[in-house]
Image (tube, rainbow, N blue to C red):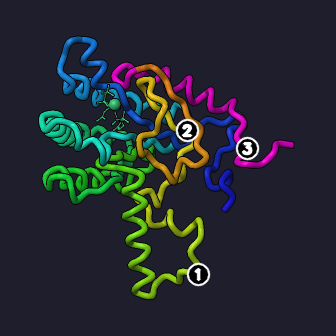
Amino acid sequence: MDVAAQNGRDGAGLGPRHVAIIMDGNGRWAQSRGRPRLFGHHAGARRVREIVECCPDFGVKYLTIFAFSTENWKRTQVEVAGLMSLFRRYISKEMTALADKNVRVRFIGDRPRLDAKLVALMDRLEEKTAENDGTHLTIALNYGGRDEVARATKRLAQDVANGSLDPESVDEETLPKYLDTCVLPDPDLVIRTSGEARISNFLLWQSAYAEYEFIDTLWPDFTAEEMGRLCAKFGTRDRRFGGVKT
Ligand code: IPE
Ligand code: IPE
Ligand code: MG
């Protein structure tokens, strides 16, 4: 399929249908206030609600947020444990509000490394919101783009080995069916807060033709207003997908 058609948006005056956000800068936000990094993570988690709720105002149907990467295990045990406990608390606390606001929640990432209690809450939130058809919120938790492609490739290879997939038929449309994001459209706009201009292993395959915004705002300071500004700016971009505009 043509990438532009697949993505659904060519930027011609339209806002992004799928926005993906690398929520970065919680640690620096806390440190600038002389507080521990976890204080910043808690402030960051509190920002999520406003951003999820503003999506319909800007025509954003899919929102994907990067909460914890496969590389974030390198952090101190205190920070990792604090984050895992925050994720459990966030899910329990937001479960009813998300369900009532017609948000459909999905998680992407490698679940087996996460603790069983957290995975049970993730499953419950997915089940509880499975019938919702408002904003599609995807939370990337223990997610890494390379890890996702490796896991997808393993399953694809298993299908070749068991005879259900003909290797000759493998093309650009085959691998995405094995990715965690198989039911989602590709992101149109990827935003990274905190001033870093890198993607840190986020949605590597899916962002091949995404537009990027690297902004200095630290995640706990990111607002619906800024989201709206970036969505409007997206509408002015000329997305060519390798072609030439006539
Ligand atoms: C992003 O904020 C949240 C996670 C990676 C879990 P950081 O914790 O990376 O904040 P900085 O980049 O150190 O400021
Ligand atoms: C990316 O931020 C991961 C998340 C926002 C969850 P990091 O802070 O982990 O990325 P690096 O280390 O600056 O590349
Ligand atoms: Mg960071």
Amino acid on which disc 1 is placed: Glu
Amino acid on which disc 3 is placed: Arg
Crowdedness of circle 1 by 10 Å Cα count: few (<14), some, many (20+)?
few
Residue hosting label 3 = 240
Of all residues, the one furthest to the right in this rendering is 246
Q: Residue at x 62, y 32 (%)?
A: 234
Secondary-structure class at tag 3: loop
Considering only vertical position in the picture, is 1 above or below 190?
Answer: below
Residue hosting label 1 = 168
Query: Ligand 2, what quadrant?
Result: top left
**Decide: marks 2, 3 in contact (CB < 8 A)?**
no
Of all residues, the one furthest to the top in this rendering is 33
Question: In the rendered image, is residue 99 in sight?
Answer: no
Q: Residue at x 19, y 27 (%)?
A: 38
Crowdedness of circle 2 by 10 Å Cα count: few (<14), some, many (20+)?
many
Seen from the viewer's position, the closer of residues 232 and 154 is 154
Pick whichever of labels 2 and 3 is earlier in the sequence. Answer: 2
Secondary-structure class at tag 2: strand
State how far apart marks 2 and 1 are (Cα). Answer: 33 Å
* Residue 238 image offset from top left, x and y in percent: 72, 36
Magenta-tinted stretch: 218-246
Q: Residue at x 65, y 45 (%)?
A: 9
Using the rendered view, name the quadrant where residue 32 is placed: top left
Residue hosting label 2 = 189
Pick whichever of labels 1 and 3 is earlier in the sequence. Answer: 1
**Decide: marks 1, 3 in contact (CB < 8 A)?**
no
Q: Nearer the viewer, mark 2 or mark 1?
A: 1
Question: In the rendered image, is residue 118 in sight?
Answer: yes
Q: Let me know if residue 98 is in the magenta part.
A: no
